[in-house]
Amino acid sequence: MKHRILAAFTAAAALAGTLILPGCTFTSSNYNAMQDYDFSSIELIQLESPQDGDTIAIFDTDLGEFRAVLYDEYCPNTVAKFIERAEAGQYNDLPVYAVVQDTYFLTGGHENDKGVYTGRNDDTEALEHEYNVNLWPFRGALITYSELPGYSDARYIVCNTDHTMTHEQIDELKDSMMSSDKRTDVEKANLNNLFDKFIEVGGVFGMSGSVTVFGQTYEGLDVVEKISSIQSDEKTYRPLDTVMVKSVTISTYDSSEAETAGTEEQ
């Protein structure tokens, strides 16, 4: 999985200066949706607070609770399937299966009768990725996972921050993507802001354009960090200590409840 991050980063770097192509359909294992994004129009909605009535998921884990808003407007098929699985109890009492130290953790799947960790019974259950220029693998993002390029299944990843990617590397990639004469001043300004936000809030930039980002943690980022910091095997990424996701509950965001909770904590 760590290799997948690096491969995606390489693909993103290779896109520097490319033309924006029409459409966002999956084409091959080397496909990265960043080549199709229209950077002249981008809203980093994950950096905004949830609004009353937004669909949210509440994750109760052994290390605490975190909450994420789900983006059914931007990736309806992925969110609908996640909600269906959650309401059926499919995500309850599952262990955190893999942890890439301080970077992200993976859960949501099961071991089949061959001992292979998977998130589907057959390939008909796989969903095509839903890419969107407004959604990025920032710290706290919920993203899909599958070993099938361009598709996802029941497994999901929660991002923390890839500390192996330095600010200097991000700046180098930013400069390469903004140096093309084919990019307008608006595109360059939006790209500059995007890269700056990754430095500011953290995330796993190497996954950009290669996965579906379908949610964003808005409460409990400390819990995400705790789970992501669990020690794991260097080869298999299996956690050395078991941490369970006890339940995933679907609800709606209520700002008055959030304000009450904040007052009680004080």
Image (tube, rainbow, N blue to C red):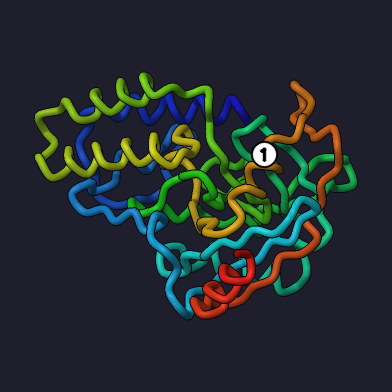
* Placement of the C terminus among the 4 image quadrants: bottom right
Q: Residue at x 61, y 27 (%)?
A: 2
Per the image, the residue denoted by label 1 is 228
**Where is residue 188, by image quadrant?**
top left
Horizontal and vertical percent position of residue 165 = 47, 24
Nearer to me, 253 or 97? 253
* Placement of the N terminus among the 4 image quadrants: top right
Residue at far front of view: 266
Number of marks present in the image shown: 1
SS at badge 1: helix
Horizontal and vertical percent position of residue 176 = 24, 23
Q: Residue at x 61, y 76 (%)?
A: 251
Q: Residue at x 37, y 43 (%)?
A: 33
Q: Residue at x 28, y 28 (%)?
A: 174
- Residue 246 in the image: above or below residue 107: below
Q: Is residue 196 left or right of residue 68?
A: left
Q: Is residue 53 left or right of residue 59?
A: left
- Residue 1 in the image: above or below residue 71: above
Horizontal and vertical percent position of residue 202 = 46, 38
